Amino acid sequence: MLLGLALGLAANAAGLATPMVTKWVLDTLGAGESMARPIGALLALVVVGAAVSLWQWRLLGTLAEHIVLDARAAIVRHYFRARVGDLQRRPVGELVTRATSDTQLLREASGSIVGLVNAGIALLGTLVLMGVLDLYLLGCTVAAVLVVAAVMGALMPRIAKAQAAAQESMGALGGALEGALRAIRTVKASRAEARSTERIVADARQAAAHSVRAARVTASVWTIAWTGIQLAVIAILGIGAWRAQRDLLEISSLIAFLLYTFQLMGPITELTQNTTALQAGIAAAGRIREIENIATEPSGPASLPAEPLRAPVAEQPVLVFRGVTARYGPDGPAAVQDIDLAVPRRGHTAIVGPSGAGKTTLFSLILRFLEPERGQLLLDGHPYAACGHDEVRSRLAYVEQETPVVPGTIRDNLRFTHPDATEEEIRAVLRAVRLDDKIDSLPDGLDTSLSSTEVSGGQRQRIALARAMLRTPEVLLLDEATAQVDGLTEAALQECVRQRAAAGAVLTIAHRLSTVLDADRIVVMEHGRIRAQGTHSELLAGDVLYRRLVEALRIAAEEPAVATR
């Protein structure tokens, strides 16, 4: 930055000297002397000024890109350190805009700081040299510049406000468009293309209105600046000619003064442009600083021990809830209350309950997406509070119901949680989820992009399950991981889950008949509390809500229907 400033000062010096050397050329011509030296000096100034300006532009351009890169890297790091709940409360499109469009405005603003300094020095230097030539004409020029500056200063806050509103509306537009494109199948199936288009176009109109308002204010500033300069030039030309007629000013000095007057357009224009860019950058920086308000996950003070626990496996649950209560906001209702639950080190535990019962909240607590308000969780007998988030998650694997995949190939996705997995390990989990033959049949095999239409939703779900199993976690969390597969494949995956349950804990949010029947133990939730626990037979005989859930899941297809009491 300092070197760029110094180069700018050097370029300014060359520019400021040019009118004086031009005066030298004219005086030499009038005296009938050799023109070699003044012409040579004028050419040298042009060459040196061009070379220094090129160096400055390249240097500042590189510096600006590094500033943008650092800002984007900081934003992305903050996103991935943020608490899941706080992050998900903001539209994805808006978060993307912060890291793309807003940081690009920082690029322009970073160069504008040097531009403002250089333009200010160039303006001051020009005025000083104009004073050396003729103080009277300088007074006229300063008066015109002050009027222009006063009007520009009055308009600058309006530019900042308009720029901030335009950027805010662009973020809203990005969020709306991103959400609609994610749900494009639903939009089309619902014949809602026209409504969605109109809603997003309405956001675009609002963004355009704010941008037009900002453009109009900026145009007003430019018009006032240029008009003021042109009027000043006309006035100075008339007054200068009048003074030259009376031998109060040399013709060469008048020409040099007029050249400086024309040069004033440069720094004043740069001041206007750079001030506008700086205002936009300040507005963007304010939006980026909002990201810092997203709470991040703390690092735990300790790590889980690597050595095996001394307690017998049968006596030591892998995961324990002790009187856990949690809510999603300080003023919100409790999502779960007084949860007491011990998850065996081996076996399949299914969680069932009506919508809103708190099933997903249990998973959020286990994964530390949400912290308990009261009570504690223990993993391998160690309190969560004594362990870092990364340490806890290193013992877990999670498959979401929506089975998100990361950009890249099938191989990239499988290695996402286990980057060092060997080819043999990858092949083993693919066989377990009955996906090896399908992937071998693809032209690019494991290197097939997951954006390809050759990979179906059910196959993506199996890839997600294989990815989780590749880690061989202590606890496998499944949010109905067989929701999008056919019956034959589901049976194979259930066998895969049974094998995993024989070696470790499997905890499933159950929405399907087969999952409930296959579980070793079932937890029934209602209104954020655990209502009952037991086997399928025990709960079917002793819990009214469970019988209703069984009927809703059409368990009668496997067992005789049970009357609801």
Image (cartoon, rainbow, N blue to C red):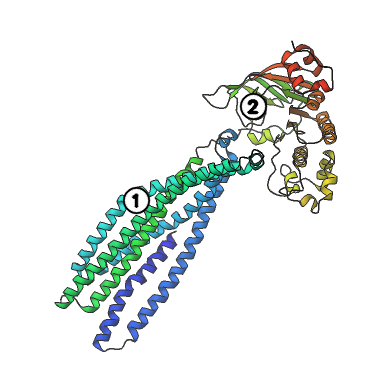
Q: Residue 284 carries which label?
A: none
Indicate the position of residue 299 as horizontal and vertical percent values: 59, 35
Give the side of residue 547 with respect to residue 338, left or right. Answer: right
The C terminus, quarter of image = top right
Could you say whether the residue bearing mark 2 is in a helix, strand or loop? helix
What residue do we see at 48% from left, 46% from top?
Answer: 205
Count neighbours of disc 2 (C-alpha within 10 A) and say few if under 14, some if 14 to 19, many if 20 or more: some
- Distance, label 2 to label 1, CA atoms, is 49 Å
From the viewer's perspective, is residue 219 above or below residue 412? below
Residue 326 visible? The answer is yes
Depth check, front residue: 204 or 316: 204
Please name the amino acid that badge 2 sits on.
Thr
Extreme residue in the top direction: 565
Instruction: Nearest to the eye among marks 2 and 1: give it.
Output: 1
Which quadrant holds the N terminus?
Answer: bottom left
Residue shown at 24% from the left, 86% from the top = 30
Q: Which mark is residue 361?
A: 2
Which residue is rendered at x = 24% and y = 87% of the image? Answer: 31
Is 547 above or below relative to 129? Answer: above
Query: Which residue matches tag 1?
Result: 156
Tell me if 99 is positioned left or right of 438 in this view: left
Residue farthest left in this picture: 246
Question: Observer-nearest residue: 45 or 214?
Answer: 214
**Residue 201 placed where, x, y %?**
52, 45
